[in-house]
Amino acid sequence: MRHRAFILIAVLATPIAAWSAEPASPPGAQAKGLPYVYTNWKHITKADGLPNDHILAVKADGPRVWIGTEGGLARFDKRTGEIRSWVYKDENKDGKEDTGGLPWKVITAIDVDPKTGDVWLGLFGGGLARFSAGRFDHFHQLNSGLVNDVVYGVAIENDNVWAATTAGASRYNPKTGQWTIFTEKNAPMEEIWNYGVAYHDGKIYLAVWGSGCLEYDVATGRWEEYLDPDGEMEIDLYRDDGIIHVIVTGASPVDGALWVSTYFGTCRYDGRHWRGFYAHETGLPSDFTNNVKARSANECYFAHDKGLGVVADFPTESVVAYTRDPKTLRGVAQVYQHGKHLYTVDMEQGVPHNFIIALDTDGNDTWVGTSKGLGWAIGTGYYPGVKENPEWLSKAKPAPAATASTK
């Protein structure tokens, strides 16, 4: 489902070093404390009532969790464990499932309006849908101002709904019925393939293939471009001079920080400084990244093609990589600091699959959408940052001589 015009090789042109500009402790040294590790996981799949195991979107909404799949929409109630699903209306031939008129099969994005409780759905090839009071309303190119029917991202901004599509972005005001389209004609888009959209603190952030991350100030209507200033598409020529790559798949702003995912690594911007994260020097599972969700300015979750990568504590350069062992099917969590592999935690369950597409944080919990089901990481005893002698340490196996990562 990802658009690839060509394959690039992203490499560093500068010597590998610890990945914070001013490390909290000397390079290679362990910080005083360790990050939190999720060791309690539950899997939710088609066997439990989901329409499909290919999870493309997930949105926590109080006690409810909305799940977008390749085969329809589901709602999971954390209190009761009940799952209700809606499938594409034209495929409900046996009458056993309550479709509720779902206008399209594949759900790629979800957001919930905090004022009305309406659930907005991005549809892969079907446009945009609103689920309100048990009814679905359908918006597409033939009946609305939606610029394209392939919608990858949805975000609520005050009274407006934004949709990131493969032909630009659309903004819709349900109260006035007004649509606004943003393309290369009125926005700084060298390419118009929009992968994601996020809203925070008066600004919209668009993740664009080939155009980096675009910031739109709602009050002034002004745009800010976040690009790689060195102008080299194939390599990151100058370290931390800007966004790590212009093929951006997601942006997650929070607490004065902007976290960005790309096909060639991930990065963070604090308003003054950029910091890029590469798998081979941090311990993250991969550089190919499908999505991003930040919990705070210091903690962020990345959906990779080879596992779940977490910058668990930015100041101490702490990373946790969650994967599923393909042989034993058990969960594995690997803990790194300053690029050094410190511990491996073996778990009965972890992420349901290593190809991860969707993420959301939910209080102390985290939701992970994969190609083989939804993972619920239950944050019992969760803590931000690092602390000494965490509970998970008793289940961990130290890495041999705490050698540097060879990823």
Image: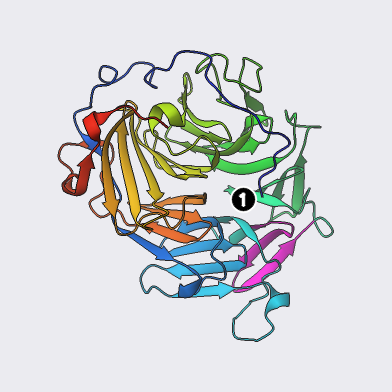
The residue nearer to you, when weighing 187 against 157, is 187
**Quick one: which residue is furthest to the front in this view?**
327
In the displayed structure, does residue 103 sit left or right of residue 282?
A: right
Name the residue nearer the viewer: 86 or 5: 5
Query: On screen, 157 above or below 47?
Result: above
Q: Is residue 260 magenta?
A: no
Drawn side of residue 146 relative to residue 240, left or right: right
Q: Which residue is mark 1?
A: 159
Q: Main secondary structure of the magenta part?
A: strand
In this rendering, the count of numbered labels is 1
Where is 107 relative to 158, above or below?
Answer: below
Location of the C terminus by quadrant is top left
Q: Residue at x 73, y 31 (%)?
A: 189
Question: Can you give x and y, in whole percent of width and height, for residue 36 in the image?
Answer: 27, 43
Q: Report x, y in % for residue 105.
A: 67, 66
Residue 137 magenta: yes
Residue 406: x %, y % from top left: 39, 30
* Residue 117 visible in the current orientation: no
Asked which colour scheme the image uses, the reply is rainbow
In this view of the protein, which residue sits in the foreground, 209 or 323? 323
Q: Which residues are magenta?
A: 122-140
Amino acid type at circle 1 is Asp
Whether residue 251 is situated above or below residue 97 in the rendered picture? above
Q: Residue at x 42, y 41 (%)?
A: 309
Can residue 236 be seen in the rendering of this structure? yes
Crowd around label 1: few <14 · some 14–19 · many ≥20 (10 Å)? few
Determine whether the residue tagged by mark 1 lies in a helix, strand or loop.
loop
Residue 334 in percent (x, y) is at 32, 41
Q: Residue at x 32, y 57 (%)?
A: 378
Quarter assignment of residue 69: bottom right
